[in-house]
Image (cartoon, rainbow, N blue to C red):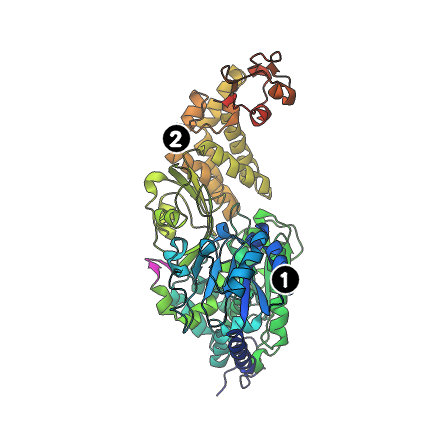
Amino acid sequence: MAKTLPHSQKQQQKTLDRSPILLSKEKIAEARHIANKKTIIYIGMGTCGLASGGQATYNAFQTELLKYKLDVEIIPVGCIGSCFCEPIVDIKLPGKARVVYKQITSDKVIEIIQRTLQQEEIITDWVMGKYTAEGTDVDYPEIPLLKDFHFFAKQEKFVLSRCGIVNPESLNEYIAHEDGFKALADVLETNDPQNIIDAIKNSGLRGRGGGGFPTGKKWQFCRNAPSPDGKKYVIMNADEGDPGAFMDRAVLESDPYSAIEGMIIMGFAIGADQGFIYCRAEYPIAIKHLTIAMNEARNRGLLGNNILNSGFNFDIEIKKGAGAFVCGEETALMESIEGKRGMPRIKPPYPAIRGLWGRPTNINNVETICQIAKILNYGAEKYAKWGIDRSRGTKVFSLTGKITFAGLVEVPMGLTIKDIVAIGGGIPDGHKFKAAQIGGPSGGCIPSHLIETRIDYEKLKEVGAMMGSGGLVIMDDTTCMVDTARFFMKFIQEESCGKCIPCREGTRRILETLTKLTQKPKNDAEVVDRMKNMMSLETLCSVIKDTALCGLGNSAPNPVLTTLKYFRDEYEAHLYENECPAKSCIGLLNFRIDAEKCIGCGLCKMHCPNNAILGEKKQVHYIIEENCIKCGLCESNCKFAAVILE
């Protein structure tokens, strides 16, 4: 007997209609049969691909293929994670494996057409690898598999499995690849919301947005919470604001349907019929692809009223954020959706009990939601085999900073920081690893002697850091840790909503202290002031952690506390010796003209905005330190490397 749907006591479940999914599979199978006899070009058109010239490459292929009169299909795809290789172009010749070309700018298009498309020759110098395909494993024996490329070798693609592979605008491709929307159909047919929640609990999935709260438990709270009118909401937090973080953007640009399917399942599990995607307006491609995906899903009966003839109604609305960092905090995000200024609410009550417009609301970030359907298809127990202890599954990181290969990496929980640095090709230019900032601006810096720290929620907390949403900034021995703490504190202070005094005023005082440390004191009074401020710095940080209103304020001092803990010698050098060991803080360095290299050309003097350089033509010039504002124009304009910063 059909069960009563959880969101309504009146509406009975109908016979499920799977035809939109099955019909799509038939169509895509036919398309693949045709495609096997047709050449296809896949071009990376995510933000990283476009920034590297992907649009020009796409346009060049369109123009030149017309000239050569070749019947070739061009499909735009997202990012596979190796941003350092963009623009990426995949070539799929009839009956052959799909080959990945790297750094294909528009000037290489004609050669690819002539050699690869016309002569079926693979240009090995441009190849990154090949995908496996049924019946084509023996193709191109000289070309390694893409999964064997060192950047991908230790990765486990779960969240990112479709990214860069399928057309993000094609519902058919989503359905055909890894059984898209099968999990939703199974959920609606079984009609057992508690079973879904139990599966998510058994998977060990924890929120990937920062705190790492168990996802299944969060859903359970919301499902059990009473609502004054029976109304509940779900929200996908796509307000990704950490410097250097772009995981959510890449997933939404490359695989928007996984977010939609995950939200529908989440809504069914807790008894909601309305969802909101809160996405910052700076992500136009993500918003475009989400909009297309939602419209396609509605047209096929996968979103909106009576989904798959099950009687279940659920729809999604996109809300654009204005870029306020604080709106990544869940209660500030809800305030923004309600049309108010984005400022955190006092908790408890938590959103699962009293959230959007006073109704129970479940909020998860993009990475969390995009795993839901895959976990149900893959199997909760099988998924839980990835990871270690209480940290299960995989985690996506945006790997940036002083690293050879920047991009997106997805690894099983339990790997170490050292493993991820190795995936990124290590530190470039012969420098040494110094630290990794993990968890965004309010995360912590992990020093070189802790490089074996595991990617594990609890282990990261033990060393003063946090998982966060997945930003991972690598630093080398040229990085000043005092200036790094100042940079992150400047970001936090500027993004503080100002609602609570500890965050509003405390972060300002911390920033002032760090700024003064990176500059030479002008008099004895400033020397004394710097000493006093340093003596109270840790106390101030502790007060902010204990008294700030929201999680962002509570974690704001983390960059300062971890750098003080692990790099105190650098603070002392700045404070007592007015020196920056990394030679990074311009305010503590001086520009000097090397008399042996200076020929008296006058370019440095000509470009100095403060008349700090003296010297006659063809005579050695020199800098008046008191007048130098350290703009660096003298160094950048000297053609003989005579200006030295020391």
Tell me residue 640's x, y (percent): 53, 23
| Foreground residue among 605 and 111 | 111
**Is residue 78 visible to us here?**
no
Quadrant housing residue 145 = bottom left
> Is 587 left or right of 282, judged from the image as shown?
left
- Tell me the kind of residue under disc 2: Arg
Q: Nearer the viewer, mark 1 or mark 2?
A: 1
Name the element at disc 2. helix
Residue 253 is marked as none
Residue at the location (60% across, 79% down)?
306
| Foreground residue among 534 and 94 | 94
Q: Which residue is mark 1?
A: 62
Quadrant housing residue 153 = bottom left
The boundaries of the magenta stretch are 386-392
**Is residue 500 visible to us here?**
yes
Magenta run includes residue 111? no
Tell me residue 493's x, y (percent): 56, 38
> Is 374 left or right of 422, judged from the image as shown?
right
Residue 568 is marked as 2
Tell me residue 106's x, y (percent): 59, 53
